[in-house]
Image: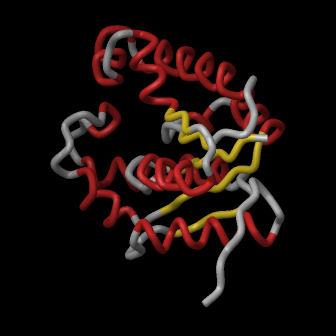
Amino acid sequence: MNLYLLGFMATGKTTVGKELSAILQLPWVDLDHYLEQREGRTIPELFRDFGEEHFRNLEQQCLEDASKCSGQVVTTGGGVILRERNREMLKTTGFCITLTATPECIWNRVSTDSGRPLLQHDNPQERIKQLMEERSSYYAIADCTIDTTGLSVDDIVGNILTILSDRNLFGAVVKTK
């Protein structure tokens, strides 16, 4: 079983996943990074040169690779949940946690990042709201959800460790003071 972190862009998946990996002493796989390494191109380049459909095919292949292993913390791209096959893989091979944040919080986190192909839009703030609304039912497949708005990485990680400990997953033990 893997621990999958799902959620919209800039909800903290990568930062939190890296920290969880260190604490739980489990390998960490960031699907976006894995995809870029495998393809030798950045995600914005893949979108620009081949389009979103091609990128989603590559993303699915990377998820298939990761799902063949067990005992990992896997951070996903925000759109990995768009395909039914991916949602099935996530649910059957791991415990899924969706990280959320308000559209305003997400915009604050990405407003200076030009490497977000889906936000190359006339009104990126409106695009964030639209995409979040379109994807909300897909993110709901997760076993639990954590709103990261206003939380520190330590707070988010602590919440996840409590959830894992309560469910006896991944050897997580929360120390009480």
136 displayed left or right of 170:
left
Q: How many marks?
A: 0
Q: Quadrant of the C terminus?
A: bottom right
Q: Quadrant of residue 47?
A: top left
Percent coordinates x, y for residue 118 in the rendering: 34, 35
Vertically, is 145 above or below 88? below
Q: Residue at x 66, y 52 (%)?
A: 137
67 displayed left or right of 128:
right
113 displayed left or right of 76:
left
Q: Which residue reaches farthest bottom?
A: 177
Residue nearest the viewer, comparing 71 with 10: 71
Q: Residue at x 75, y 34 (%)?
A: 70
Vertically, is 12 above or below 30? below
Vertically, is 69 above or below 37? below
Percent coordinates x, y for residue 98 in the rendering: 60, 56
72 displayed left or right of 168:
left
Percent coordinates x, y for residue 23 in the rendering: 56, 57
Residue nearest the viewer, comparing 143 with 169: 169
Q: Quadrant of the N terminus?
A: top right
Q: Residue at x 66, y 19 (%)?
A: 65
Q: Residue at x 58, y 20 (%)?
A: 62
Vertically, is 166 above or below 51? below
